[in-house]
Image: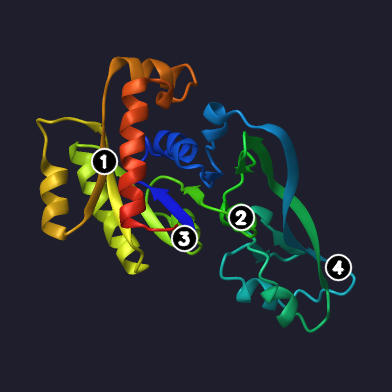
Amino acid sequence: MNIAILSGKGGTGKTTVSTNLSTIIGANYIDCDVEEPNGFIFLNPSQIKREEVQVDYPVVDSNRCTLCGDCAKVCQFHALVRTKKDIMLFEKLCHGCHACEIVCKQGALTFEKREIGIIEEGRYGNLICRRGILNVGEPMAVPVIKKLLKNFPTGINLIDCAPGTSCNVVNSLQYADSAILVTEPSVFGFHDLKMAVQLVRNFHLPFGVIINKYNAEDDRVQKYCEKEDINILGAIPYRREAAEAYSSGKMIVELPEYKEIFEEIAKRLREVFPWN
């Protein structure tokens, strides 16, 4: 079973929930926030293996090219531009779809590969931890996410999605059986939670909400969930000792109060998403 963990915006504690919950329920951890993967900071897995992620890009044979420009016209990503002297390539815009190769009547295009990131896999006890890392300056995260999610480990897998509701999150949700939405009781958190709810409903996924940085004086999330018939899986209070543990790279379940809270969330999770 694959459970996606997402949030409408960054900074809500999505990774904190993902990493700590993975140790409590014994789930493998998959970090799909490939532009800023930081779950390994807390889990610190060992026996790391690495694999490159490569994408195709076209190479133009100037001896065959007649500068007809058909390749540039068919490229919807504007990766190819015809000039008076040659066909220019903006390789970071290329999605490797090979449409340019198909329309080229002269057979002037071939494809080579370039690295845009890596996949890392290690172990935290009996759990498998995987993450994708997009190279700095690369604009396309989706190929890294797709390769990361191509083969899942056996068992329960927690997919730590990118923040927001972008195409990176959409691609991750395609591999999920259910979802956990992490939010916080703030104006921005509440606004973006509603966007995330709409997204998972479009995928027809069963889901629940965890309120991080819980503040008893602000009940807008609870009222919204009650109105929308959404399960609240738990609430994680904001305490100084938890912030100190987080800032030093420690798991907050090392604190007895928070371990008990996550165990209650795990119990609630099994009631909402039964997997055994």
The Cα–Cα distance between marks 3 and 2, rounded to whole angstroms, is 14 Å
The location of residue 104, given as percent across then percent down, is 76, 80
The Cα–Cα distance between marks 2 and 4, rounded to whole angstroms, is 46 Å
Furthest residue in direction right, as rendered: 63
**Identity, as a three-letter code, of the amino acid under mark 4:** Asp
Write down the quadrant of residue 112 in the picture: bottom right
Which label's residue is closer to the chain start, 3 or 1?
A: 3
Circle on res. 61 = 4
**Identity, as a three-letter code, of the amino acid under mark 3:** Ala
Which label's residue is closer to the chain start, 1 or 2?
A: 2
**Identity, as a three-letter code, of the amino acid under mark 1:** Gly
Q: Is residue 30 left or right of residue 180?
A: right
Which label's residue is closer to the chain start, 2 or 4?
A: 4
The location of residue 5, given as percent across then percent down, is 41, 48
Residue identifier under label 2: 154
Write down the quadrant of residue 126 in the picture: top right
- Residue at point 33% right, 15% down? 241
The Cα–Cα distance between marks 3 and 1, rounded to whole angstroms, is 21 Å
Q: Is residue 20 left or right of residue 133?
A: left
10 Å neighbourhood of mark 4: few (<14), some, or many (≥20)?
some
The location of residue 50, given as percent across then percent down, is 74, 41
Q: Nearer the viewer, residue 163 or 113?
A: 163
Marks 2 and 4: CB-CB under 8 Å? no
The location of residue 129, given as percent across then percent down, is 60, 41
| Residue 219 at least partly seen | yes
